[in-house]
Image: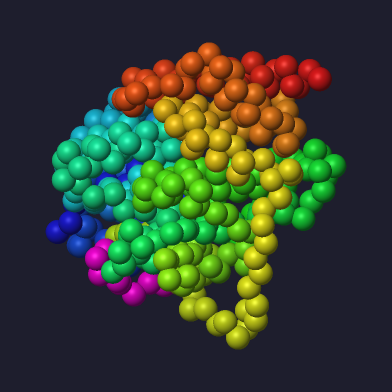
Amino acid sequence: MRRISIFGATGSIGENTIDLVRRQGGPEAFRTVALTGGRNVTRLAELARELDADIAVTAYPECLGALREALAGSRTEAAAGPEALAEAADRPVDWTMSAIVGAAGLVPGLRSLRHGGTLALANKESLVCAGALMMAEAVRHGARILPVDSEHSAIFQALQGEDRARAERVIITASGGPFRDWTAAQLAAATPEQAAAHPNWVMGQRISIDSASLFNKALEMIEAREFFGFAPEQIEVLVHPQSIVHALVGFADGGLMAHLGPADMRHAIGYALSWPDRAALPVERLDLARIGQLEFRAPDEMRFPAVRLAREVMARGGLAGAAFNAAKEAALDAFLAAEIRFPDMAGCVEAVLGQLDAAGNLTSATIDLDKVQAVDHLARLKTAEAARKTGKN
């Protein structure tokens, strides 16, 4: 019986993971060690009871009492807070889903690698903030990281059986989100509700807004470099409104290997759950005749500067990825709080990166957790200051 843990169980990735676990036998086929979530402790407890989990952890200490009450009468232990998340990650399993949103997923992901099992990585921020650290930890403990982002799963699949050295380019697709055809004036008046209304994918609020701003795609560019070792100049982005082609890999003979699939995260999750096999999945089978045509166009980096910023982050190296992600998360907080406008997020991030770079805060010969967390904290403070100044103008 495989032992599994799911970090971020109550989010969209977590729920889809549990859907597949349920379809593949549930508690009779999997021993669920740990489930974690946020404030929705009622749902977390429901899932823990269903999967007979050893422990359920909420990220928020103030929610511990409610979680304990919801789990009363079950055998599942309740815990709360960052330390409890890390301790849950220390419990040995064969397969871990890392689906906590943001930099908060870094420590549990790192700790889970120590088991020497498989880490299914949906938390792209881990590689953006500390890619070298994550990959080194996996090697040290004989663990395997499998990508769960649809784009990186597509790249991974396209490279199976191929000589990685003969891959000369990778193209990551972006739907363009709800604002792909909006003017600069329209973007300036965009609300969080409009930004979160993704036309193709069903995702959480934050990642949906990141998709609308192309910050999600910027993170994926950096992730592609860290995971697969592509040079920045080998990584391209195309806007593809249909979200059918998730990524393409170009080889030395000029051929392109494309991965096509429906806009359903259960495909990438299921691939990571069953790898190296392929299990039958309850996803739509594409009808290309009905789809009719696939569109591609270059992203507008004037309206959506995040793609350009990602290239600059990769060129800087060092701790730039950690600072970029932290600034992006803090800028999104300010947008959600109506302190800044939608386009101001990129402006704040760019300004903070410039400040930290000029001060030498991004330069580091080695990357360790303390340095990553220090620059993360500093970038959030600087971004909050930049947002306050921007909001007053």
Q: Residue furthest front?
A: 253
Residue 109 in picture, x, y percent from top left: 31, 38
Q: Is residue 277 magenta?
A: yes
Residue 385 in picture, x, y percent from top left: 64, 16
Q: Residue furthest right?
A: 185
Which residue: 72% across, 25% down? 339
Q: Is 298 situated left or right of 286 in this image?
A: right
Q: Is residue 77 something that shows in the picture?
A: no
Residue 17 in picture, x, y percent from top left: 37, 56
- 148 or 101: nearer the eye? 148
- The structure's colour scheme is rainbow
Which residue: 48% across, 78% down? 285
- From what the image shows, is residue 371 above or below residue 129? above
Q: Which residues are magenta?
A: 274-282
Q: Is residue 298 something that shows in the picture?
A: yes
Q: Is 116 situated left or right of 387 in this image?
A: left
Which residue: 55% across, 40% down? 310
- From what the image shows, is residue 267 above or below residue 307? below
Q: Residue furthest bottom?
A: 289
Q: What is the chief secondary structure element of the magenta stretch?
A: loop
The C terminus is located in which quarter?
top right
- From what the image shows, is residue 196 above or below residue 319? below
The N terminus is located in which quarter?
bottom left
Q: Is 258 situated left or right of 113 in this image?
A: right
Q: Is residue 352 magenta?
A: no
Which residue: 34% across, 23% down? 365
- 368 or 257: nearer the eye? 257
Picture quadrant where residue 244 is located: bottom right
Residue 184 in picture, x, y percent from top left: 81, 43
Number of numbered discs = 0
Q: Is 33 situated left or right of 101 in this image?
A: left
